[in-house]
Structure formats: C-alpha cells, structure tokens
Amino acid sequence: MKPKLEDVAKLAKVSKTTVSRVLNKRGYLSQETIDKVHAAMEQLNYQPNVVARQLYKKQTNIIGLLFPTVANPFFGELIEALEKKLYQEGFKVLIGNSMNDPEKETDYLNQLLSEQVDGLIVGTHNQGIKEYKYANLPIVAIDRIMNEDIPVIESDNYAGGVLATTRLINMGAKKIVHTNGPINLETPAKRRRIAYEETMRANQLDPITFTLDFNIPYDEKKRLFYELFETYPDVEAIFASNDVDAALILQVAQELKRRVPEDLLVIGYDGTTITRSILPNLTTIIQPIDDIATTAIQVLKQRLKKEATDTEYILPISLWEGTTSQK
C-alpha cells in the first residue's frame, strides 16, 4: 500500500501538521525535527503529492513556452537556453510548436492555460488572439508585439540592420537587396528593414526590399529566390533577414554559378552557434540568445511577483565576420 502523510508522521513521532510544514518549508522547525521527517519519508519511500502542494501554494512552477518552430536554429537554441535556465530556477516547461498557425497557437495556448501554468514566454507571430489579454496571466514576448501590456525582449534590430547594410556598402556594393517578411507584421524585427532602407538612402543608394512570407514551404521560397536573381540580375549583395534564408540564397547562388564572395556578397541575421558551425563562411549579425533568455526569465519573474516592468528590453547585437574574404 502506498504510504500516506499520517504514516510518515507516525514513524517520525510528530504530527501530520509538522510533516506538512516540513514539506512546504513553512514556519520554524528544528533541524532535528526536519531530519526525522526526511528519514521517515526515505524509510517509507514516501512521495509527496506534488499537485496538492502546488494547489496549496497556488502555483505550479510550470512555465509555458510557445514558439513558431523548434526546427529553426534560432528558436531551437533560444528554447534550449530558456529550458535550461528555467530548470535552474526551479521551473519545469511545457513547449508548444505553433508553426505560425493562429488556430494551432490558440489551441496550444488553451492547453497551456488548462495545465495551470504560472506564466508564458511567447515568440509566435500571430496577433489578435484574445487569450493573450488575460490580465492575471504573466506573459513575456520575445521579438514579438502581442499587446500593449506584454513586455518585449529583443535584440537591437535597428542597429543590426545598420551594421549589416553599412558593411556591404563599405565593401563596395551598391545594388543591395534586402529580403524581409510581411511588411504589415507588427514585430521589432521589421526595424532591420527600416534600418536597411534608411542606411541605403543616407548613402544615396536605392533600397530594394524583396518581401516574402516566412510561412511558405521550402520549395516555394527557393523559387522566389530564383525570381530575385531573375528580377535583379545585377545584384551585388543580399542582406537576408535571417540565416535560414541566407543559407538558401547561398544555395541558389551556387546553382546559378554566382561565386560568393567574388560575384555576390551575402550577410545573414541570427548568428546561432549551429549556423556558425555549419556555415562558418557566412557573415551574419549575432543575436545574444543567452542574454535574451536570461532577460526574458528575469522579466517574467518580476511579472509573477506583480512587479512593474518596462515595455521593451533591447539587447546589443554583434557581427560574425565569417571565415572567407568577405571582410
């Protein structure tokens, strides 16, 4: 028979209340009493009722993570960092993979809420989902604008856009194309496009933003990149809004016999560890994933304590030079 709380109390020769206080670390207790209770628990192989303790404390120590896809290196490394750091803080995580589908995101969100998570860290793109308006649910967003009450953690997208564009210009490129997601999407990442366009104009150059939906299948995106080269056959450089697109652009360029960096300069954005390992030649803007995760958790803990937080937290970016002559 599974041992009960009263069995532990009887063996330790203390009251049930004392055992409960030891389990929940409440009130003053002598070390001798604590040791007796733990010894009795070990002898009986007693496992505390975690659910009951969580209800007693009115918290589950579970944080929901909701992101577009773990397949993307940036989101994969970010989720890994968040899970590791949350575990160190005493939290467990539930992960939802929304695939940029608003219906799926809503379904995942409702499932997370039914699991009574203490809070959410969200990096999805969809907006206008009513469940995000729950006033009592602590939420932190990463590089996404959910609503005016949810703080956003992000890298310095504008500085990254300026750095990438300026680098290509300084290397002699004049016909520079920037690939970017839907212009109407309200996300801090759109500042990469704004920075690119303003930097081009500041250097008396015409900006060319090639817009595509990041939700489209791989084959469709590859076709569009072929279209990019057909539309702008004299393109000298491409600033891709993320490293996954940059990798695909490099593949298309190779198939078109465009040599990089001799005939074409390419710079990406994200700079994940895995991308820098697999594509060490790719110059890219590094987002500080570890710092983003740390800041998101710090802000979420403030929200859990109902402390005031800022609306936006912007973290510095850096440049990965790549290992070819694109320097």
Image: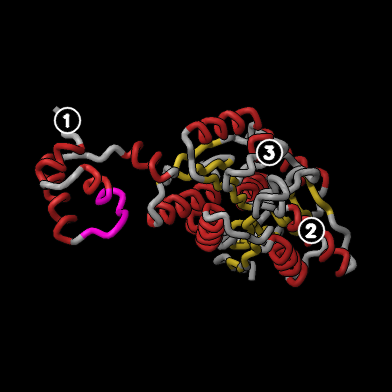
State left or right for residue 63 relative to residue 130: left
Can residue 294 be seen? yes
Q: Where residue 151 sits: x, y (%)?
A: 65, 54
State left or right for residue 2 relative to residue 118: left
Which label lies toward us, 2 or 3?
3
Q: Where residue 268 sits: x, y (%)?
A: 64, 57
Which label lies toward us, 1 or 2?
1
Mark 3 or mark 2, which is nearer the start of the sequence? Answer: 3
Give the residue drawn at x 77%, y 40%: 227
Give the residue drawn at x 80%, y 46%: 183
**Residue hosting label 2:** 176
Work out how far the residue at label 1 is from the one at label 3, CA to CA, in angstroms.
Answer: 47 Å
Which stretch appears magenta? 21-29
Quadrant placement of the C terminus: bottom right
Element type at mark 3: loop
- Between 195 and 107, the residue placed more toward the observer is 107
Magenta span contains residue 155? no
- Between 32 and 79, the residue placed more toward the observer is 32
Q: Residues within 10 Å of mark 3 (few under 14, many from 20)?
A: some
Residue 126 tag number:
3
Amino acid type, mark 3: Asn
Give the residue drawn at x 53%, y 35%: 113
Work out how far the residue at label 2 is from the one at label 3, CA to CA, in angstroms.
Answer: 30 Å
Amino acid type, mark 1: Lys
Element type at mark 2: strand
Colour logic: secondary structure
Residue 287 tag number:
none
Element type at mark 1: loop
Callouts 1 and 2 close, C-beta under 8 Å: no
Q: Residues within 10 Å of mark 1 (few under 14, many from 20)?
A: few
- Between 15 and 132, the residue placed more toward the observer is 15
**Residue hosting label 1:** 2
